[in-house]
Structure formats: structure tokens, C-alpha cells
Amino acid sequence: MKNELFSIGPVTIYGYGLMIGLGVLFCILMGMQRAKKHGLKEEAVIDIAIYGLIIGFLGAKLLYVIVEWEAFLKNPMSVLGTEGFVVYGGISAGVIAAIVYCRIKKLKFLEYFDLLSASIALAQGFGRIGCFLAGCCYGRETDSCLGVVFPAGSIAPAGVKVLPTQLFSSAGDFAIMAFLLWHYKRRKYVGDTGFLYMLLYGIGRFFIEMLRNDNRGAVGALSTSQFISIFIVTAALLLLWNNRKRGVAVLKESEQ
């Protein structure tokens, strides 16, 4: 809606970048505070966040290149030089980085996945506000009272009333965060909270894609993200089911 927020001398503060930065900052602070409270390593949270951010950024861009492959072959810089990213690429790459880190440091990945899943949802909520400010990830045209009109200079079409799918996504991410915080204290098996994050985000992303109208690639009748969501949701259900049979029970504080 307003990507350029203000300027300090020659430095311009952009809404998208600011929201991403705030999301990462609050993600780390929440993770550290909760790690200390639940007996996990605060420095590990910082390391996972840093490596996850760097590798996740590369993964999000890589998946965007794959989605825009034809455009990339015609003009690589037109794709690499844009602000285009695919969130699922970032999440997948970030998780892989966290798994590798935990293996190297001999930490239990699922313990940190459970702990940080709410923080990830929090960061995503801020990121979607950034999308709204930039005008990317916009929704379909509408006559609904929920519609918004983006100004000239936004990525979204100017002067057209569209659904603010970015804000819908943000509200969903914050709701997922709240639920995961509630669930973490009540989980029965290690990994349950992290797998629930996968399930809830995958379902929410599948349905929000039905309301979007930006160009984001397709696999048959589905958008790229809907196609990936099917696998994420299926994997989450299988992992939750497997956890009921072979999972490691969570020790309550009185049992530790």
C-alpha cells in the first residue's frame, strides 16, 4: 500500500524490508526467551535463525527461478533482479539448514522445531504485512467492502479494488502462532507442534491461493503453492500419525 515509508538522508526505508526485519527480530527474541524458559539453548536459536534466514533466502529465490523458468532463460537478470520469492522454497531450505545444524551440534531437531514453529509463524505474519505495503501477492478484483485500492507505483494493479489477501494471510499466520503457543505446553510427543505448523500452514496456504490474482506459476489447474501444499499437508498428517505410534513422549517438568 505504501512501500516507501520514509527517508533518512540518502537512505529510504521500505515497508517490505522493514516488516521482514521486524519479523526476523521478533522471531529470534521470542525463540530465545522461550528456549531459556524450556531448557533449550539460546545460542542454538540464534544460529538456527541466521543459517535458516540465509539458506531460506536462497531457497525462496531458487524456487522462484524454477517457477519463472521460461522468463529466466530469456532474461536471467529480469528474474534474479526482482523482489520475487516463493515462501515454500524459503521454508524448505530453512528447515534443511536447521536439520543439518542440529545434526552437527548433536541437538534434537524436533525439539527446536516444536519450539520455533510459533516464531516462524510470527515472522511470516509480519512478512505478509510487508507484502501488503509493497502490493505483491494481491487478491482478485472484488466489490466487497473488504476490498482495497492500491495506489500507483505498487506491484498490485492501481485503481482496482482487490481482496487484501496479504492481510488475510497475515491474520492466519498470527492465529497459527497463537494456537502453536497454546499447543506446545500440551503436546504429547516431540514433533507434534512442528508437524501441526506444517498442517495448518499448508491448509491455509492452499485456500488463500484461491483468492490471489498475481502471477505465481501453475501446475495444471493448481498454483505452484497449492501443488506444494498438498504434499506438505500429506507429509504432516503422516508424521503426526507416525508420532502416535513411534514418537518420543514429552517429559513434563515434574518428570524431568
Image (tube, rainbow, N blue to C red):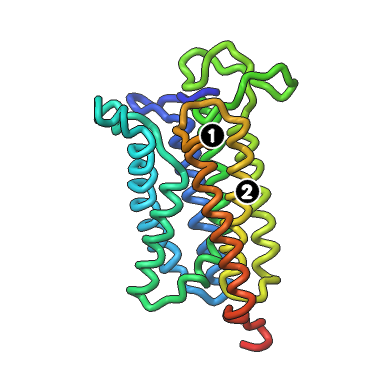
Front residue of 183 and 256? 183
- Circle 1 residues within 10 Å: few <14, some 14–19, many ≥20: few
Q: How many marks?
A: 2
Task: Kindly identify the amino acid type of the residue bearing the numbered disc 1.
Answer: Ala
Image: 191 above or below 210: below
Would you name the residue on which mark 2 appears? 203
Rounded to the nearest angstrom, the CA distance separating label 1 from label 2 is 17 Å
Is residue 47 shown left or right of residue 209?
A: left
Image: 143 above or below 238: above
Q: Find residue 251 and report its image quarter.
A: bottom right
Q: Which image quadrant: the N terminus?
A: top right
Q: Position of residue 241 (x, y in %)?
A: 62, 70
Asked if residue 5 shows in the view, the reply is: no
Would you name the residue on which mark 1 appears? 221
Task: Kindly identify the amino acid type of the residue bearing the numbered disc 2.
Answer: Ile
Q: Which residue of the protein is positioned furthest toward the right in this rendering?
A: 145
Q: Find residue 163 and report its image quarter.
A: top right
Q: Position of residue 160 (x, y in %)?
A: 59, 13
Q: Position of residue 222 (x, y in %)?
A: 53, 37
Which residue: 41% across, 47% down?
89
Q: Position of residue 214 (x, y in %)?
A: 51, 26
Which residue: 67% across, 19% down?
142
